Amino acid sequence: MRLIAENLGGERGGETIFSGIGFVLEKGQALIVTGPNGAGKSTLLRVVAGLLPVAAGRLLIEGGAEDFPSVASACHYLGHQNAMKTALSVAENLRFWRDFSGADFLSAEQALAMVGLDGIGHLPFGYLSTGQRRRAAIAKLLVSRRPLWLLDEPTAGLDKASEERFGGLMREHCSEGGIIIAATHLPLGIEGAQGLAMGEAV
Amino acid sequence: MWSLFLRDIRLSIRAGGGALTGVIFFLAVIATIPFGVGPDLNLLARIGPAILWIGALLACLLGLDRLFQADREDGSLDLLVLGDDRQMLALTVLTKCLAHWAGSVLPLVIAAPLLGLFMNMEPIGIGATALTLLVGTPAITFIGAAGAAVAVALPRGGLLISVLVLPLTIPVLIFGVSASYGAVANPDPFLQPFLILAALTLFLAVLGPVAAALALRHGTD
């Protein structure tokens, strides 16, 4: 599998946020997107995911075969919000996304154990702290299998130990042939990741 | 899809879901009408079906703005839209509509016979009104979904949705009320308006979710 972006441009509300971004990611590679606030990191991730239209250039995925014909079907998108319902328990949330996303991978309990939240699956999501919420959202990446992870500031709110644990999960994902694109300000601990520095805000 | 339906039903029942808000609003509207109209029992019985329908229509519109907005606020909507390749977005919307209907509108239909007693309606009229509500209210939810999808990004979209959707619900209201009258007033037909009402619901069950899916797909930012 290979993800190719050529001369990619993105706009929001008719205003160009970035242009001329290009990268090629092979199986097992990661891309770390850095840049000041307003440089367009989140917009880039949303364009790649297909939530915003591609304003210029092109974006394609090769070798996805039948399972993953498009980028949207091949990706997990972890945005600023956690996409979990506060009124439901953590396990209910994860089970829902597992059923909805298809391509089952880990069970909700196993995924929670992977992020160090075992034993709290029965609590309503609204009772968790910011860092725990983020970790539960990361567990969402593990309940169904997707080769491409699009992570928008994935470690916001995480403590040191959780950051390292998440670094391990990302390394494992890459070694299994996955692709990661992460927008971040903090080092994520992925060796051999490509870097993409986005410029000042236009 | 079943899991999405269950999730939305659970959310509407649990705290903050607002499943009861519509019923209480419905109750408030119907309970105040006899005080306003006065103790003329014949008049109340005559306007009963129409008042029940108008009350139910307004109560339906009340909760519609949360249909997609709650999912947008916590980021779920992005993932629902991204899942389009596996779970067609129009079907996702249809499922959400059905869950919304079962969670917030079905209680109105169940409460309608009780409120019909307040209006001094005959048993057969009450039965006919409840039946037409059961068949007709899904249509309001389906139209409302399209309105809710258009207004999803607006912070105070509730009123806008009502204004957008209300004109489109008028045919549903007309045929629902005329079928209810047809059951009690002898020369008026019941079956014809009732079948048109059912046809409207089926038609909008297709059109509404497709329109809403289009609006959601192009409304992400």
Image (tube, grey):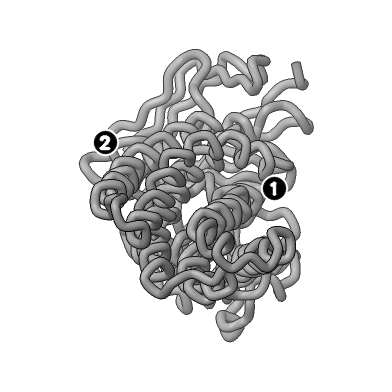
Q: Is residue B190 visible?
A: yes
Are the residues flagged by discs 1 and 2 from a single subunit? yes
Residue A65, percent across and down?
22, 40
Q: How many marks?
A: 2
Report the side of B11 relative to B133 (left or right). Answer: right
* Horizontal arrangement in the rendering, residue B179 relative to residue B12 (left or right): left
**In the rendered image, which quarter contains the N terminus of chain A?**
top left
State whether residue A133 appears in this view: no
Q: Quadrant of residue B138?
A: bottom left
Specify whether A143 is left or right of B147.
Answer: left
Q: What residue is drawn where x is 43% and y is 55%?
A: B137
Name which of mark 1 and mark 2 comes first in the sequence.
2
Q: Secondary structure at mark 1?
A: loop
Residue A29 place in picture, x, y as percent: 46, 41
Q: Which residue is mark 2?
A: A63
Numbered disc 1: what chain? A
Q: Indicate which disc residue A187 carries.
A: 1
Identify the residue at image location x=46%, y=67%: B109
Q: Split into 4 quadrants, where in the image is the C terminus of chain A? A: top right
Tag 2: Cα neighbours inside 10 Å, few (<14), some, or many (≥20)? few
* Residue B212 screen position, x and y as percent: 45, 38
Q: Identify whether B154 is placed above or below B72.
A: above
Q: Secondary structure at mark 2?
A: loop
- Give A14 or B180, whichever is nearer the viewer: B180
Q: Which sits in the foreground, A91 or A190?
A: A91
Q: Residue at x 64, y 35 (%)?
A: A42
**At label 2, which amino acid type do we have?**
Gly
Task: Find residue B19 and report its horizontal and vertical position in percent.
Answer: 58, 68
Q: With respect to residue A143, does A101 lie above or below?
A: above
Tell which tag, 1 or 2, sits nearer the viewer.
2
